């Protein structure tokens, strides 16, 4: 019996949600593999895929510091990474103790760099799984703030210890990885029919209003959401309720959780207002639902998506002044009428990654 150990960044939900799709594909392809997950992301993301006792927290990833959902704190992010590196020795010691108990054949990282350091110390092969590497993300911060290169070197050292990286589209990685294997888009897919989702939400199938999913709670005040919802009678604004903050009058609260995934709701909508994060981009490409996006600051991968995204998905910028003022209606109507993309993008990345990982593990012969 072979065991896989996944180290997954708890920065947002995107890393955990996409890696859960790879784990699900592995379960279908090679159910004999035992999976353990180390992450600070919520256990519920892996419900039904990994027994809860095999999903445990670890402080192996710094993530990024944010001033808001739309703005990275560059200095704070570097401070967090340097603080993590200062604690590297005890963290590695703790992880080595854990590894001795589960005895993994392979470590998979999305995309904590210290996983490579741990794997090297344990004598266990490690691969990366991501559309970006943290050194690529923070390189501009180091340059613009005149900070020491030591953090970049340490991150690169961890990644250089990995056997390879399975690189997803729409991002960027540094050149330190030994081998780069390009894989298709890894995307969450809703498992329910839109008509069933609408029924659960109490939306009549004959309701012809444009259904808009707001996917960035906390990015605007409640009053702004209310203004956006009231700006047109032909629009129905849906807002998930598993995040902090109140849902204002005129907005339909969506109880995302057990039995109703965010992806299910997205596929039942006509437009989504959200960030250009990988997870949402992947779902919009897969479902064909257009994305109305406010501009973020400090998220380097957004530059790639803004450049390459329009060819493979329907997307339109929501200017920040209009975003914060709740003047969304005109942009929503325009987004809903966008023509289809001119190019297609494969979305079977979870299955491709599962095949590669399964093959690698079985070739190990341990």
Image: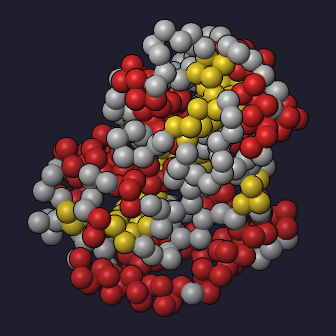
Q: Residue at x 13, y 56 (%)?
A: 32
Is residue 317 left or right of 167 when viewed as pictured? right
**Can you see residue 175?**
no
x then y, percent, for residue 337:
65, 11
112 in relation to 185, above or below: below
**Quadrant of the rendered image containing residue 142:** bottom right
Q: Residue at x 73, y 36 (%)?
A: 225
User: In the rendered picture of this protein, how many numbered marks are placed on residues?
Assistant: 0
x then y, percent, for residue 128:
43, 59
274 in relation to 83, above or below: above
Is residue 240 left or right of 67 when viewed as pictured? left
Which of the two residues, 350 or 220, is positioned nearer the viewer here?
A: 220
287 in relation to 101, above or below: above
Q: Residue at x 73, y 47 (%)?
A: 219
340 in relation to 53, above or below: above
Which of the two residues, 200 or 189, is positioned nearer the viewer here?
A: 200
Q: Quadrant of the N terminus?
A: bottom left
**Quadrant of the rendered image containing residue 365:** bottom left
Taking the view exactly as shown, the residue that stands out farthest to the right is 321
x then y, percent, for residue 5:
31, 67
x then y, percent, for residue 291:
63, 28
Colouring scheme, one of rainbow, by chain, secondary structure, one colour: secondary structure
**Can you see residue 117?**
yes
Q: Residue at x 30, y 80 (%)?
A: 99
Q: Quadrant of the C terminus?
A: bottom left
Is residue 107 left or right of 306 when viewed as pictured? left
């Amino acid at each position: 019996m072979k065991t896989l150990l996944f180290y997954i960044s708890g920065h947002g939900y995107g890393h955990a949600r996409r890696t859960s799709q790879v784990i699900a594909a592995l379960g279908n392809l090679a159910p004999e593999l035992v999976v353990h997950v180390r992450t600070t992301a919520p256990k519920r993301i892996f419900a039904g895929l990994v027994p809860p006792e095999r999903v445990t927290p670890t402080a192996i990833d710094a993530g990024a510091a944010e001033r808001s959902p739309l703005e990275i704190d560059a200095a704070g992010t570097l401070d967090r990474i340097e603080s993590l590196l200062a604690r590297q020795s005890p963290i590695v010691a703790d992880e080595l103790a854990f590894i001795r108990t589960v005895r993994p054949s392979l470590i998979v990282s999305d995309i904590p760099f210290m996983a490579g350091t741990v794997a090297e110390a344990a004598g266990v092969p490690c691969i990366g799984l991501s559309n970006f590497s943290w050194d690529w993300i923070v390189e501009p911060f180091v340059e613009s703030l005149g900070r020491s290169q030591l953090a970049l070197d340490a991150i690169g050292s961890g990644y250089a210890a990995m056997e390879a990286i399975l690189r997803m589209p729409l991002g960027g990685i540094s050149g330190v990885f030994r081998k780069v294997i390009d894989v298709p888009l890894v995307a969450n897919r809703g498992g329910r029919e839109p008509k069933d989702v609408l029924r659960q939400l109490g939306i009549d199938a004959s309701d012809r209003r444009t259904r808009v999913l707001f996917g960035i709670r906390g990015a605007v005040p409640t009053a702004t959401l209310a203004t956006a919802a009231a700006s047109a009678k032909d629009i129905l604004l849906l807002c998930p309720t598993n995040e902090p903050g109140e849902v204002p009058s005129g907005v339909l609260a969506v109880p995302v959780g057990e039995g109703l995934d965010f992806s299910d709701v997205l596929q039942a909508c006509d437009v989504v207002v959200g960030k250009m994060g990988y997870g949402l981009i992947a779902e919009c490409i897969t479902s064909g639902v257009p994305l109305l996006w406010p501009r973020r600051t400090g998220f380097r991968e957004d530059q790639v998506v803004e450049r390459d995204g329009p060819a493979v998905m329907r997307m339109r910028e929501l200017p920040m002044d209009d975003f914060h003022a709740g003047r969304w209606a005109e942009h929503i109507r325009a987004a809903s009428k966008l023509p289809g993309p001119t190019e297609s993008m494969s979305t079977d990345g979870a299955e491709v990654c599962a095949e590669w990982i399964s093959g690698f593990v079985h070739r190990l012969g341990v």
